[in-house]
Amino acid sequence: MHDEQNGHSPALTELRKKLAGGLARTGMNKTQLADRTGLGRTTVSQAISPKAPAPTEQTVAALARTLKLSVEELLELQRTAAENPDTAKTDRAGGSPPSSRPTAPPPPRSGGSTM
């Protein structure tokens, strides 16, 4: 089952809601959270972003510990989200899932025949 608004699984939506709530409670911004976890700012931002893929277990565990959230609960949500990857995601240009995008034929080979 996917969230109607963003195409992600309910587990991923809940995981992000808990991470965002934990961040709000601490009063930190994403840069401060990245510094305290040892993660990159982009990694932290993508973990909370509804448009990014599910964060890794290592990212979730580091964020949960720093935000004083239940590591096991968030890892369970992450595992559930990873088992049900986002199949409704579309690419920005063509609007079709990446797996159904046509590929361009290879360029013609240069040079003459070697026979």
Image: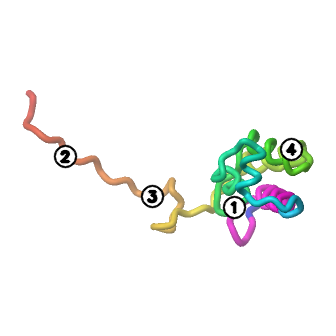
The image shows residue 36 at horizontal and vertical percentages of 78, 46
Look at mark 1 in the image and give the residue it sits on: 49
Residue under the point 23% across and 48% down? 107
What's the mark number on residue 101?
Answer: 3
What's the mark number on residue 65?
Answer: 4
The image shows residue 56 at horizontal and vertical percentages of 71, 43
Q: How far apart are the two marked residues, 3 and 4, measured between alpha carbons?
A: 40 Å
Residue type of the residue flagged with mark 4: Arg
User: Image check: 26 left or right of 51?
Assistant: right
Q: Quadrant of the N terminus?
A: bottom right
Secondary structure under tag 4 reads: helix
In primary-sequence order, the first of circles 1 and 4 is 1
**Rendered position, 39 above or below 94:** above
Work out which residue is located at the far bottom of the displayed protein and give it: 5
In primary-sequence order, the first of circles 3 and 4 is 4
Question: Which residue is nearer to you in this view: 38 or 65?
Answer: 38
In the figure, residue 51 lies in which quadrant? bottom right
Residue under the point 70% across and 55% down? 31
Q: How far apart are the two marked residues, 1 and 4, measured between alpha carbons?
A: 19 Å
Residue type of the residue flagged with mark 2: Pro
Q: How far apart are the two marked residues, 2 and 3, measured between alpha carbons?
A: 21 Å
Residue 51 within the segment the image draws in magenta: no
Secondary structure under tag 2 reads: loop
**Rendered position, 84 above or below 61:** below
**Rendered position, 108 above or below 114:** below
The stretch of residues the image draws in magenta is 3-23
